[in-house]
Image (cartoon, helix red, strand yellow):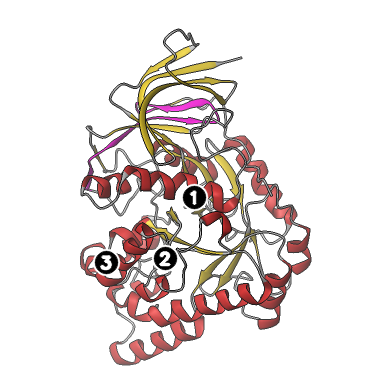
Amino acid sequence: MSTILIRQAEIINEGQRFIADVFIKNGLIDKIGNLSTYIADKTIDAKGLLLLPGVIDDQVHFREPGLTHKGTIYSEARAGVAGGVTSFMEMPNTSPSATTLSLLEDKYAIAQKNALANYSFFLGTSNDNIEEIKKADPKRICGIKIFMGSSTGNLVVDNPNSLEQIFAQAPMIISTHCETDAIVKANQAKILAEYGEEIDAKFHPLIRDTEACYTSSVLAISLAKKHDARLHILHISTAKETALFDNSIPLEKKKITAEACIHHLWFSDEDYAAKGNFIKWNPAIKSKTDRDAIFKALLDDRIDVIATDHAPHTIEEKNKRYLDASSGGPLIQHSLLAMLDFHAQGKISLEKIVEKMSHNPAILFQIDKRGYIREGYHADLVLVDLHDTETVNKSTILYACGWSPFEGHTFQSKIKHTLVSGHLVYSNGQFDESKKGQRLQFDR
């Protein structure tokens, strides 16, 4: 038996703010309240600190197996817990692509040995793996991932019959990357004909434009409605797409949901001049108008969750000419800090941050006993100091790739402690790696 007592924290949970103690026993939240008589194996003085449910990031790319020169499950989950992320859901575009249950279990085996955060993995789709999809266990796998454009190998599902089968027969939530490759290719051909091949990243949102995203999202929604499927559209990047989503019903009853990512909330196309390929993502970062509309949809609950699409590439891969540079970037270490900066600017409440980064991912994916500070729930918790700062530089970046699009920025808050399944894995810059995270279970 191991116990931890967190004393006098300001708890932000389920729309409420209050000061209380939290007693943790055997990895679970045992008691919340005035616990002045309690004694524990370890006590954390949290006076002056915020206590939040740990962040659940529903979209990351940790690159293992096969692409470990970019990152590993160990390295990227470690960076995540330093940023207050206690659970992650990882995508199938590794090498080999995780399009069979056997290959998926290989990833779970790696995570069981190495992940400092709790974990789950999406089963990838192809034009011909419907039988694998049908066998997936909804209680043990977070979801099915469809690349409706913008991927490599066999992961792009571009056969209309295959899409119909997946939406009709998938036994759990379907998450989609929505871009229409034909539009992207036509846009690129037109721009290259006019400007030549030595273009830079400012053309990225012109190539991967609004229509490429919108037409694909419309298709996904139409298929979901036709087959009464549960659909979650990832990384919304356009103002036009925000009109596709509903805020008139509670999340628990929604069949179609959406996600916003940190980079689409933070950057705009004006940042390409300074950041170049280091903010090259698919779908592209677009205009300030798009960014502001996404933020508005987040606040009014048309967009349901905040994630990162954490996707590390090496500096060498990002320093190639625009056409050859990899798309994606590392964000998981700083996602909560970024949202807390928005709070400091008066743009979003602490309660709404917790809702979008912790509660709603748990609701949306029906995660068992996580995402809240509740008695009987797993103790996935983060303690934050709103009165300390953290500057991003090479010495503080924990990603294997060694860079961040936030380099040089000083965040107005600091992560002090992170607990994963009741284990104090990160404390004041130090890690205790003696225990690993747990496989997420789903109440479906």
Residue visible at 47% across and 64% down in the picture: 248
Examine the rendered structure and indicate whether residue 107 appears above or below residue 231: above
Distance in Å between CA atoms under marks 2 and 1: 27 Å
Residue visible at 43% across and 50% down in the picture: 356
Query: Neighbour class for label 3 at 10 Å: few (<14), some, many (≥20)?
Result: many
Q: Amino acid at mark 2?
A: Ser
Q: Which residue is mark 1?
A: 360
Please report the bounds of the magenta region as a residue range.
Answer: 408-430
Examine the rendered structure and indicate whether residue 261 appears above or below residue 416: below
Tell me whether circle 3 and circle 1 mark residues in contact (CB < 8 Å). Answer: no
Numbered tag placed on residue 327 in the rendering: 2
Tell me whether circle 2 and circle 1 mark residues in contact (CB < 8 Å). Answer: no
- Among the two numbered marks 2 and 3 on one chain, the one whose residue lies closer to the N terminus: 3
Residue 216 position, x and y percent, is 51, 78
- Among the two numbered marks 2 and 1 on one chain, the one whose residue lies closer to the N terminus: 2
Residue visible at 62% across and 52% down in the picture: 142
- Element type where label 2 sits in the image: loop
Residue 71 position, x and y percent, is 48, 49
Query: Neighbour class for label 2 at 10 Å: few (<14), some, many (≥20)?
Result: many
**Foreground residue among 317 and 165:** 165
Q: Nearer the viewer, mark 3 or mark 1?
A: 1
Query: Neighbour class for label 1 at 10 Å: few (<14), some, many (≥20)?
Result: many
Whether the magenta-drawn stretch holds residue 27 is answered as no
Q: Which residue is mark 3?
A: 268
Q: Amino acid at mark 1?
A: Asn
- Among the two numbered marks 3 and 1 on one chain, the one whose residue lies closer to the N terminus: 3
**Foreground residue among 42 and 442:** 442
